[in-house]
Image (tube, helix red, strand yellow):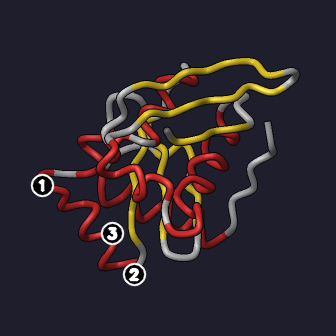
Amino acid sequence: MPEVTLTEDTLRYIRLFENMTNTHVRDCMETEDKLVFVVDPGSANKAVGKGGENVIRLKNTTGKNIQVVEFSDDAEQFIKNVFYNYGVQSVTLESRGNIIHATVTVDPQVKGRAIGKNGRNLKIARDLVARHHNVQSIIVA
């Protein structure tokens, strides 16, 4: 798995998030317009806040979209959590030679959003999963 290096900005975002939500952040991935926070198992609802209030406050403070993902030691469950907003129907993991490949089946009506413009959301999801699990390839079906 790749070594994860957090920048000063990312560490500031983590501190801000933890102070606002009273939850522990395991990882934070910053992209051009989005911050993805990985929180401890069982704490995603607390992190998001009632009616999404914490996420909304963070978005207003940082100017970036916020995604909260609950961590899981189980790769399949973690991938489900990463794609949670897209109505995951199933995740299938398989070995192909020396790589582990995941096929994520989501609600067909939001498949395009799950992949994102020019595949941006899918790339973010792949990078995030690779940081925590030995899965090198993901497609959305």
The residue mark sitting in front, 3 or 1, is 1
Amino acid at dot 2: Gly
- Asked if the residues shown at circle 3 and circle 1 are in contact, with their CB atoms under 8 angstroms apart, the answer is no
How crowded pointer 2 is (Cα within 10 Å; few <14, some 14-19, many 20+) is rated as: few
Of mark 1 and mark 2, the one earlier in the sequence is 1
**Alpha carbons under labels 1 and 2: distance apart:** 19 Å
Report the residue that reaches farthest toward the left.
51
Specify the label residue 88 is tagged with: none
Query: Of helix, strand and loop, which one carries label 2?
Result: loop
**Alpha carbons under labels 3 and 1: distance apart:** 13 Å
Specify the label residue 51 is tagged with: 1
The residue that mark 2 highlights is 63
Specify the label residue 58 is tagged with: 3
**Alpha carbons under labels 3 and 2: distance apart:** 8 Å
Amino acid at dot 3: Leu
Q: Where is residue 125 in the image (x, y as percent from the top left)?
A: 56, 48
Classify residue 106 as left or right of residue 56. Answer: right
Q: Position of residue 45 (x, y in %)?
A: 24, 41
Of mark 3 and mark 1, the one earlier in the sequence is 1
How crowded pointer 1 is (Cα within 10 Å; few <14, some 14-19, many 20+) is rated as: few
Query: Of helix, strand and loop, which one carries label 3?
Result: helix
68 versus 66 height, above or below: above
Indicate the quadrant containing the N terminus: top left, top right, bottom left or bottom right.
top right
Residue at the spot 69% in from the left edge and 59% down from the top edge: 6
Residue at the spot 33% in from the left edge and 52% down from the top edge: 110
Classify residue 90 as left or right of residue 135. Answer: left
Q: Which quadrant would residue 101 be assigned to in this image?
A: top right
Query: Of helix, strand and loop, which one carries label 1?
Result: helix
Residue at the spot 69% in from the left edge and 67% down from the top edge: 7
